[in-house]
Image: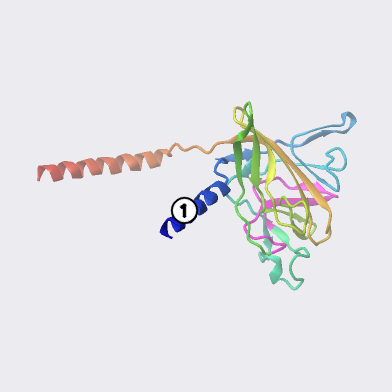
Amino acid sequence: MKKMMDALLLAAVVLGFLSQPVFATPISGLMTIDPGLRIPRLGYVSGSYFAMFANNPNSGAAMLAPGSAGGLTLGSYQPFVLNPDVPHPHSPFGPGTGYSGTPTSISSLLAPFGFFGVPTYVGTNPVSYQSGNAHPVPTASYDPASCVGTVCQLSMTLDAWEVMWNGSAFEQGPRPSNSGPFVPAVGTYDLSSHAYAVTWASQIKNGPFNGVTGYWHLSGVVEPVSTVPEPPTLALFAVGLLALVGSIRRWTRS
């Protein structure tokens, strides 16, 4: 009986191990955002954009530009803040119908852009103003097994992506159907140049655009976060090391 239980336990451990994305390699740093550029007479679009109703950057799409941070900071939130700063379920309108408020703080992620002539704000909010749900920080990873040369499949968690437009907030993380959960956004990542591109669709749930799908496309490069300690940190480390050496010398003499 004990051998059978040990075998079942081992099988459970192996299955649990295999079910984890152990081959995913996390990416850290700042994902810069290439400004969108459209030349209508040439039918040419490059860079980052947002489109609604259809994923066609040449038909009414808004060109995106990076905010004060230069892009998306992985592992951190870059929220916009509304006045009053209360998620929608606590308002008299009830959850999921859009939140009436005015921005008092703009996200560092994207610069505000015009959509239907209205300033539009995008942030990664820890708690959604529309649904009141908490969302994880944005993350990114690539699958080494998917690489062709230096280009690999990119996977991103962008549940916290939220938009403020004309007095209404609505979630725009990757969600093909608004009756389903958020899913990873998929794109490409180049191990050599650190260039990335990611596209996702998000069907809006409730609010003024209920049932309409928004399409997002971001491109740029990943700038790694420096792991070299700052000069003050190095100085403190040196002082601590000298103090430790001095203590050891005093101890060995006594």
Label 1 residue SS? helix
Q: Residue at x 51, y 51 (%)?
A: 11
Image location (x, y in percent) of residue 22? 54, 43
Tell me where residue 237 sits by quadrant. Answer: top left
Which residue position is annotated with label 1?
Answer: 7
Q: Nearer the viewer, residue 39 or 232?
A: 39
Image location (x, y in percent) of residue 100? 76, 64
Q: Is residue 107 above or below residue 188?
A: below
Name of the residue lying farthest toward the left: 254
Q: Image check: 148 left or right of 236?
A: right
Image location (x, y in percent) of residue 48? 74, 38
Q: Residue at x 28, y 41 (%)?
A: 241
Q: Residues within 10 Å of mark 1 (few under 14, many from 20)?
A: few
The answer to whether residue 109 is magenta is yes
* Residue 106 visible to the viewer: no
Q: Which residues are magenta?
A: 104-131
Q: Nearer the viewer, residue 117 or 35?
A: 35
